[in-house]
Amino acid sequence: MVSLIALSFLTAGFAVSPNPLEVGGELVDAGDITLLQGSWVGDFTSEDWDSTLSLAYGHYSMNYVPAPFDFRGMDRRRNESNLALQFNTQKQVKNNLWLMGGAGVYDGFTNYRSVWLDEYFRQQYSDLPGVPGAENYVEADPKGVNATLGARWEYKPGTGFAQIDLSWLEDDASPGYEIDFDGLRRGRLHLHTGSVSISTENVLTPRVRSYVALRSSQTSERSTRYGADASLFVAVAEDWIMRWNAGAASENPQFEATYIGLALEHQIDHSVSWFVDGRYYDDTGEIENALLFTTAAPGLASERFGVGFRWIGDNWSSRFYLARLRTNYDPLRKDIDFFQNLYRDRDWDIVQVAISRRL
Amino acid sequence: MIFLGGCANVPVYEQGLVSKVGMTRTDSMVQGDRVNLLPQIEPGSAISGGSVAAGCSVCR
């Protein structure tokens, strides 16, 4: 996931950030699972090139608790971290055309769920003397690289932009395992992903800006995943902003996800504003075709409500955000009962702090 | 079509409101409003993949 997060520095942005240096931290905590991410982003501009270098550190800690009937499982505190480095650059090659490129690497588990599942597989399958295929178990060592090429076209001066990005990712994943009467089998260790993103941003009126992106991605041995994301920014008054965001994702044979969010921001004076936001997410659960049981998540619905403030100064700026996210999974099926403590409903507290400095 | 702005022609001097912080899409944590860790919990929010390294490779 870190590679995807890092990749988003390219795919979502239409221009290099005006803030040359930014430091941010994010904490997402549910009590038994804590996710932490810190990031540093620096912008470097020369006469011909605008470049961004970003470094992100993630840390996951959790209380692994097996299902009550898991006689091989045991409680364990698990801590993992990861590091990601990403470089992006763009160059204006014509009056209305920019070319972009980027590359990145990461090392470490990219999400808390893969850490949980890795602990489950380690407890179940790392010591199976005499079982056919026992040698298929390997210690997970997730890492990956990515590269992106893109172009941005200002098709209407100052008001209309279109962008295309082509991305390539190589992941050494934390593998999954299955066991049956034929022995232990391991899922793929190495995953290839290619993706295409087409997006457009437009100033529709003196008060309305829009953004639309369509994406497709293809990962090893999976169907193509399609996604769409749209945002509408509306200045409902001189000092009030309304932001809408909605999106969807689809992948055969059965994964569907949708989300919608709304934020209201009030500018108290020329530098300080506060905002509230809410978001609803729903999916059908992940794709599975395992033999006996599956690690795939069941269907999920979640709601998020948050409040924050933003301060924009001449040189320094900052943002603080607090939110509560409630996740509600569909009732567990029999084939997923082993992961009832991973896929249980939780209340997540979210804290974000970011500071930027214009050099 | 409304998102594509095919008929829009807003001169730069009238773009003061749409250029304010909070009115533009950005990856900046200060100026934007994205929760970077959210796709871990809501897999359909990820911009691509979804279970690329989510431990779900056994599922396919």
Image (cartoon, coloured by chain):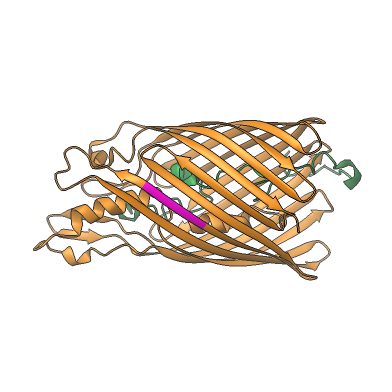
Chain colours: A orange, B green
| Magenta span main SS | strand
In the rendered image, the vertical position of residue A191 relative to residue A70, given as above or below: below
Rendered location of residue A349, percent (x, y): 48, 35
**Seen from this angle, which residue lies furthest left?**
A130
A173 sits to left or right of A316: left
In the rendered image, the vertical position of residue A186 relative to residue B32, given as above or below: below
User: Which residue is more in the foreground, A217 or A281?
Assistant: A281
User: On the image, which quarter does residue A183 sit in?
Assistant: bottom left
User: Which residue is more in the foreground, A249 or A241?
Assistant: A241
User: Which residue is more in the foreground, A339 or B60?
Assistant: A339
Specify whether residue A243 is in view: yes
Asked if the magenta segment contains residue A4, the reply would be no
Asked if the magenta segment contains residue A60, the reply would be yes
Rendered location of residue A124, percent (x, y): 19, 53
B46 sits to left or right of A21: left
Give the extent of the magenta segment. A57-61
Rendered location of residue A272, percent (x, y): 75, 36
User: Which residue is more in the foreground, A22 or A184?
Assistant: A22
Please name the residue shown 57% across and 52% down the image.
Answer: A215
Please name the residue shown 35% across and 42% down the image.
Answer: A297
Specify whether residue B22 is in view: no
Please name the residue shown 44% across and 39% down the image.
Answer: A29
